[in-house]
Amino acid sequence: MRGSGLVRDGEEARAAAESAAEPLDLVGVGIGPFNLSLAALGDGVPGLRCAFYEQRPAFRWHPGLLIEGATLQVPFLADLVTLADPASPWSFLRFLRERERLFPFYFAERFHIERAEYDAYCRWVSEGVPGLHFGHQVDAVRWNAEQALFEVDFTQLDAHGEAEALGRSYARNVVLGVGTAPYVPQALRPLAEAPSVPVYHSSEYLEHREELLAAGHVTVIGSGQSGAEVFLDLLRGRPVGRERLRWLTRSGAFAPMEYSKLGLEHFTPDYTRYFHGLSERVRDGLLPRQWQLHKAVDAQTLAAVHDELYRRTQALNDGDGDGGGWPDAVLTPGVRVRTAGRGGRSGLELHVEHTEQEERGVLTTDAVVLATGYTERATDGMLAALHPYLRRDGSDRPLVDEEYRLVLDRAVTGAVFVQNAERHTHGVGAPDLGLAAHRSAVILNAVTGRESYPLPRRTAFTRFGLREERSGAAGAAGPAGRSATVGV
């Protein structure tokens, strides 16, 4: 970067001119697992010039949820590269070999690795793949029609997150991988945003774990995997008979994730192509009905919760506890929080409604953990200059083509790709780590205009529609759709 302190206009203009003379093939905005996958596979494409920018100082993957013993819900083969290139030097197995842990892993016979180990693996990749720039905040992306390039303005940040220098890159293509942000329901936002009120999103759980373990009564809200893991960890950490825990969810049951082998075929490129080919109306109707594919709880975690509760009934009935024959833990599905506020003596009040009983009530608690999921990060400010070029669907969402490009006006000859922002067009597999490598390969094939990574023609035993879906097309350059082709 160009020195300390903010660069002057003349310096910026000179540097920008040099950048435009030799533009990048691809600029990535954000460095989460998906753009890290793209960078790792891009490292294997000869001549490809890439740069990825991330405002955080280093890679971290959901640090607040790296609970001891919590595992990924996908097998270790769903690393950043293997399902597109098993020979990549950035595979999880290569990481184990570099750390001299390959034989211990082999004997451990683990198909699902711990989240903390996945985070360590991704950090290893982020420290080795070239072209990654942490501490760089992307401010704007514009199309320069005269040069037929994207201008990407960024701010270099110092160790304290303060602006240190300004910069601009020019690129033929851009990929957005800005990730998601914790979602807090409207009814609970005033409490969550108030200072010194113990209402935390699950993404912050480990940061506040000791405080929560010491709280008089804790309520966990949310029926997904994070809610189950937080509830189980709190349950294990509180005294027998004095658990004082409650777990609430809007869902009608604490349901297990659909994990049958044929059910998992919804996370294949075959299903992605099928879903993309459906009408907007049908896609929008399908997604809410598929919640058990991605919003439910791993069956082993549910079993662990039940086992821990049962163990405590044994201890209580043997006289080791003081709360009677049942642990002081209440699990209630089908409950919606209408409003929330402070109660007496610094407590919290949750005004709730049971949807099936059609009854309302007030629940008191001392602390709340919101395992309420995530929402896509807004890119409106960053992409403001591109808004006139964006094509949108009937619900004002960006259209995304089969190769993960935003559909833009034909005046824009470059491409803007998206990662994990296309669930409305590509289905439940959009946020799934198991499709990361395949999607990255599709994008790289589109960017290079050739089959840089051969893709499988078929990936599922299920044929999802009556007509045979177009196979082998995703990621191949050709007349179907605009391909931003570069010579590398």
Image (spheres, helix red, strand yellow):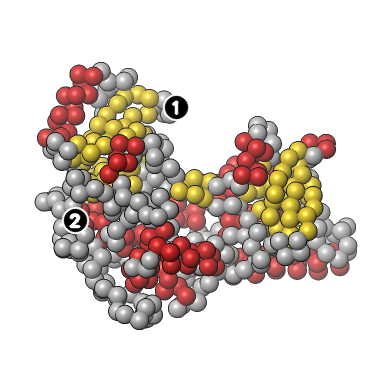
Q: Could you tell me residue 412's position as x and y percent? A: 20, 45
In-front residue for pair 117/51: 51
On screen, residue 259 above or below 152: below
Residue positioned 68% across, 55% down in the render = 336
Q: CA distance from mark 2 to mark 1?
A: 40 Å
Q: Position of residue 110 (x, y in %)?
A: 48, 68
Q: Is residue 350 left or right of residue 412?
A: right
Res. 455 image quadrant:
bottom left
Whether residue 7 can be seen here? yes
How many residues crowd around disc 1 within 10 Å: few (fewer than 14), some, or many (20 or more)?
A: few
Q: Give the camera-side residue of 429 and 158.
A: 429
User: Where does the image place residue 334, in percent across and percent down from the top left?
Assistant: 69, 62
Label 2 crowding class (10 Å Cα cut-off): few <14, some 14-19, many 20+? many
Which residue is located at x 19 percent, y 24 percent? 13
Q: Residue at x 51, y 73 (%)?
A: 259
Q: Amino acid at mark 2?
A: Ser
- Residue at the disc numbered 2: 483
Checking the image for residue 217, the label placed there is none
SS label for mark 1:
loop
Where residue 160 is drawn, which disc sits there? Answer: 1
